[in-house]
């Protein structure tokens, strides 16, 4: 009897551990019908650029790899097309949900976002926040039972995540995490990342955090960006 319990415990621990080492690929979905319709030429132009950017974004691969303690998310955009119809839309397409590389460290509760801003590479450090409001609403994504979680972003828009406790890691795509399970779907306004496929691994994944770029906090970078915008506006007045 004791041997049976030991064997069962071994396989249970092994199963749970394998659920915590995986490579996930998400697909990008876009709903252009959400929100108010543009009422002037400038807004119509902006909407047109967003629509074209979304078409580029649908062609990319959105990859999250994780082990029990860390995760690493990036966008595989492939080769840049030689004949870009709209360079601005192409540039925007890589920022539809998140921008750059995202690293999360669960035990130390911090994130790193390596991204370019104002023609400079930054390494933005922030904390992992457990600020989701979890509901009893559930649905199946693939073969996983998922629960709905929501929170507000700084702009006041709702962010909706669907996470599965069946994969007990606090990670997700585009730097989002902190839910009691892997996030398999994430929606922000018109943009959605949804599970396309997942490969569970028996061996642990080694993850190296990004280390290039000027180290900076999220608040300091936002202040720097704001000051830069004010400088540009002041120059245009003269």
Image (tube, grey):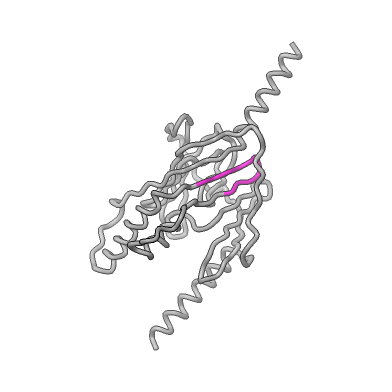
Q: Residue at x 59, y 62 (%)?
A: 124
Question: Is 127 colored magenta in this rendering?
Answer: no
Q: Is residue 26 left or right of residue 167?
A: left
* Magenta segment: 63-72
Numbered-mark total: 0
Q: Give the position of the N terminus as an image quadrant.
A: top right
Q: Is residue 199 visible?
A: yes
Q: Is residue 177 left or right of residue 34?
A: right
Tell me: residue 162, above or below residue 76.
above
- Quarter where residue 81 is shown: bottom left
Determine the residue located farthest toward the bottom in the rendered image: 238
Of residue 209 and residue 139, the one placed in the foreground of this image is 209
Q: Residue at x 61, y 37 (%)?
A: 21
Q: Residue at x 54, y 45 (%)?
A: 64
Q: Give the position of the C terminus as an image quadrant.
A: bottom left
Q: Residue at x 39, y 49 (%)?
A: 58
Question: Is 71 colored magenta in this rendering?
Answer: yes
Of residue 96 and residue 55, the one placed in the foreground of this image is 55
Tell me: residue 86, above or below residue 160.
below
């Amino acid at each position: 009897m004791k041997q049976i319990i030991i064997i069962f415990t071994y396989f249970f621990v092994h199963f749970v551990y394998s659920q915590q080492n995986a490579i996930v690929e998400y697909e990008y979905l876009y709903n252009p019908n959400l929100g108010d319709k543009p009422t002037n030429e400038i807004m119509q132009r902006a909407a047109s650029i967003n629509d074209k950017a979304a078409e580029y974004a649908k062609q990319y691969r959105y990859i999250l790899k994780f082990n029990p303690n860390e995760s690493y998310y990036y966008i595989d955009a492939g080769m840049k097309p030689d004949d870009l119809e709209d360079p601005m839309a192409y540039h925007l397409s890589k920022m539809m949900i998140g921008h750059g590389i995202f690293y999360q460290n669960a035990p130390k509760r911090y994130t790193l976002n390596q991204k370019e801003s104002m023609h400079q590479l930054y390494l933005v450090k922030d904390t992992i926040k457990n600020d989701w409001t979890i509901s009893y609403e559930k649905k199946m994504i693939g073969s996983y039972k998922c629960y709905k979680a929501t929170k507000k972003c700084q702009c006041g828009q709702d962010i909706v995540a669907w996470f599965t406790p069946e994969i007990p890691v606090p990670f997700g795509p585009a730097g989002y995490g902190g839910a009691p399970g892997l996030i398999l779907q994430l929606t922000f306004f018109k943009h959605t990342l949804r599970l396309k496929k997942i490969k569970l691994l028996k061996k642990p994944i080694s993850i190296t955090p990004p280390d290039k770029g000027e180290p900076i906090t999220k608040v300091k970078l936002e202040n720097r960006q704001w000051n830069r915008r004010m400088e540009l506006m002041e120059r245009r007045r003269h």
